[in-house]
Image (spheres, rainbow, N blue to C red):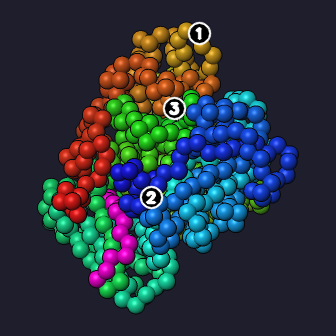
Amino acid sequence: MPHSTHPTPLLERDHWRDLGGTWRFCFDDGSGWKHPSEVTFDREIVVPYPPESRRSGIHDENFHGVVWYGLTLTLTPEERVGRLLLHFGAVDYSATVWANGRLVAQHEGGHTPFTADITQQVQAGETVEIVVRAQDNPHDLTQPRGKQDWHLLPHSIWYPRTTGIWQTVWLESVPQTYLQQVTWMGDLERWEIGLQLEVAGPLPPGLSVRVRLYRDQDLLADDRYALNHPELARRIALPDPGIDDFRNELLWSPGHPRLLRARLDLLVGEQVIDRVRSYAALRSVGVRGNRFLLNGRPYYLKMVLDQGYWPDSLMTATDEELRRDVELTRQLGFNGARKHQKIESPRWLYWCDVLGLLVWEEMPSPYRFTPGAVRRLTQEWQEVIARDRSHPCIVAWVPFNESWGVPDLPSNPAHRDYVRALYHLTKTLDPSRPVIGNDGWEHVATDILTIHDYADDPEALRQRYGTLESTRLTLRQQQPADRVLTLTGFQEAEQPVVLSEFGGIAYIPNHASGWGYSQSQSEVDFLDDYAALLAAIHDCYGLSGFCYTQLTDTFQEKNGLLYADRTPKADLLRLARSTQGNRTAREMTIDPLLNPYGHSARWLGHEEGVLLFPEDAEGG
């Protein structure tokens, strides 16, 4: 399988196998099975699609708190050499895994990956029996569950549940000592790429790692570091071209998504024992005064709310579907997406990196405040940051949304301390990106002041956000959605203001059921209403950006620019022109309307997304 389809594009090896396909399956509705030997499988499921989805072959949306999976594998000769890792992209919510009847992994958290080393369990034979038990209490509101409904049928703004395996499962062959994790961080001020890596297994004498960075076919860096410890942190200096025009050629942005390909070789002496492909980028994000900054310059955010659901597969999508969403977002004129209440597949982040789309990454919320909820969210959020912090597309972290999970923020000091704690923890784990402590309102700690305002009158938006003065007055005195925007004790310091939810215009032809925050009666009206609303937003010079609700219809919510199947509701070019507006000169940033691939084809040297290395062309 081409390495470009690897489930973790930032840590690719050649020797891996996708285990997606038909598995044995059963619901455990009260039987109380605790071990694979007790389980009776009575049906089949297509992994990685959740059983609630049509694509899984089951399509059962009833309450099922425990499900079981089984798969018998015949190992290849290559998989019986060295170590054998069993990877899970995500299992919702709590997973227990056995290999040949022996417990190999337990993991809690429905959106983050985990790995089982099954080497010892498969040494005796050529086959391995994998069994997975997934527990997901549909009524437990202390679980970080995002938009998954706890009612039997979707209601209001919540959607069908996802139970069990919903991201890729794969096998990977590695040596006894191997590269376990690679993390990149661009440093524009120093003109360096920061590298952190972790090695698993014994550390033999003479162990080292060789790191090469490429720009197209040009070798930018070729460094080698001795490894006397399983963790390494280094800075890789890049040749500074000096002149801005040449410097800009190395920078990543939506208009110019330059990625630096990386190859890492783990060596004992001169023998390569492990090899991975990865990529890095040189870019910076931050805030200064009332502006969001990209690569040190003011940059106006034109984002869309993206919930990441598909009608037949719910939260799971193919690589082609993930790529198409990024392409459509760019074609609609947006330069970013706020991935709402979902930790998306790394493949989607890969396509955002490749095609140039900024991302706000938001933690799925629990809906109760308890010690257990605090522990669960904090643990999973740390795993999210560890998984995704190398992606240059991510430009902001959002641990909370609309006070979900902290419903008493205005009156309860513990809730406010919790938001502040997550804000500061996030800044500690990744000081390179802005953090929005609680998106939408009731801010207590944030680098960007965000507002959710679904006013459907363009003039009302102009009055509230037309100037810096009117925007600050709105922050202090008005309450969109009847919520206070900043709480007592918040230190306002002219942070950028972003309208991070607005619009939500529904266009529902053929009298189908559904709703939006306002409604257009025809395609022509829809185009006109969208144009008027976006024109008003572009007139709001108190804002540093916006996020329109939303990219696609999502079940009962019919306020997408696209239908749920990704068919456009109206002419894409007219929608894109409204999205883009004519602010370019006044906002001091160039944000051209790109074709679906932007400038990616020029830097990638790729076909269908395959990142090419010089040695690939040479057969090396």
Q: Amino acid at mark 1?
A: His
**Residue 511 circle label:** 1
Q: Position of residue 115 (x, y in %)?
A: 57, 63
Given this view, does label 1 or label 2 mark the residue nearer the observer? 2
Q: Which label belongs to residue 275?
A: none
Q: Earlier in the sequence, mark 1 or mark 2?
A: 2
User: Does residue 619 lie above or below 572 as drawn?
Assistant: below
Task: Name the kind of residue labelled 2 in the image.
Answer: Trp
C-alpha span from label 3 to label 2: 39 Å
Q: Quadrant of residue 161?
A: top right
Residue 549, label in figure = 3
Instruction: Report helix, strand or loop for mark 2.
Output: strand
Label 2, residues with CA under 10 Å away: few <14, some 14-19, many ≥20: many
Q: Main secondary structure of the magenta part?
A: strand
> Are dots 1 and 2 in contact, CB under 8 Å?
no
Please tell me which residue is depicted at 17% across the width and 63% down the height of the picture: 218
Q: Earlier in the sequence, mark 3 or mark 1?
A: 1
Residue 492 appears left or right of 186: right
**Quarter of the image containing the C terminus?**
bottom left
Tell me: 514 left or right of 325.
Answer: right
Residue for point 30% across, 49% down? 610
Q: CA distance from mark 1 to mark 2?
A: 48 Å
Q: Is residue 273 magenta?
A: yes
Give residue 95's position: percent from left, percent from top. 68, 56
Circles 3, 2 touching at the beta carbon (< 8 Å): no
**Residue 27 visible in the current orientation:** yes
Q: Amino acid at mark 3?
A: Thr
Do we see residue 490 in this rendering?
no
Residue 16 tag number? 2
Residue occupying image coordinates x 33% and y 76%: 272
Span colored in magenta: 270-283
Residue 345 x/y as whole percent: 50, 48
